[in-house]
Amino acid sequence: MQLLDSSIAILDTGVSDYPRLAKVLQTTRHFELVSSHDLTTAQATLLSEIQPEVSALLLRVETHLDKLERREKSLIAKAELQEGRLSRTSAGRNSSSGARQSAGGRSSTANGSAATATAAATTGLSALEEMKLQQLRQKKERLGYAVSRLELQAGQRERQLRKSMAPP
């Protein structure tokens, strides 16, 4: 009987770890293998869903970039126009201020009339003719500004027309 008890004890110690070993050795499938046909089909489906949206987004980006480029060009043109106006204005002021400085410490209206009188004396024109000449110069400058502004507007309208005529 002792032999039987000892056999049972040995068997018991040998199989006591059996449930744990069964759990450890049990295979679990973490990844399932997918056939290449199913994979290709899924990729094609995904591509057909995503491609139109990506194309639409790219078109929107291109349109926005074109718009920004046109805006940049118009701002550059506007800045050049303003710079030209400032340089013309400052050049006109510098030439008249030089004449004013030579007249001495008189008031600005006296300086202006003195500069006009000096210019009239040197060119042989009367004060009335000198004033008309000054008015004509100012009118020429205003018309030049108007022409440049109209050219800018025409360019903008032309760009807008091209934009509206562009294929979507």
Image: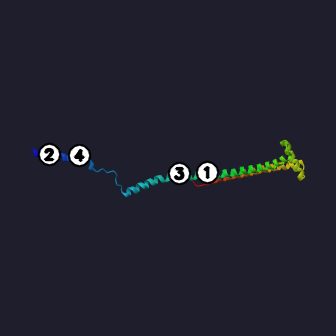
Residue 116: percent from left, percent from top? 86, 48
The residue lying furthest to the top in this view is 107
Q: Secondary structure at mark 1?
A: helix
In the picture, the disc for residue 19 is 4
For disc 1, the marked residue is 68
| Numbered label attached to residue 147 | none
Determine which residue is flagged by label 3.
57
> Considering only order in the chain, which callout, 4 or 1, is on the residue closer to the N terminus?
4
Mark nearest the camera among 2 and 3 is 2
Three-letter residue code for mark 1: Leu
Q: Earlier in the sequence, mark 3 or mark 1?
A: 3
Residue sitting at 82 percent across and 50 percent down?
Answer: 136
**Residue furthest bottom in the image:** 36
Kindly report which numbered mark, 2 or 4, lies closer to the viewer in this rendering.
Answer: 2
Query: Closer to the N terminus: mark 2 or mark 4?
Result: 2
Residue 52, percent across and down?
50, 53
Q: Please state the horizontal and vertical placement of residue 28, each as a whole percent of the image.
A: 30, 50
Quadrant location, the N terminus: top left
**Cα–Cα gap, marks 2 and 4:** 18 Å
Residue designated by label 2: 8
Q: Position of residue 124 (x, y in %)?
A: 90, 52
Q: Secondary structure at mark 2?
A: helix
Marks 1 and 2, how far apart at CA: 89 Å
User: Which label sits in the foreground, 1 or 4?
Assistant: 4
Q: Does residue 151 appear to the left or right of 164 in the view shown?
A: right
- Which amino acid, mark 3? Leu
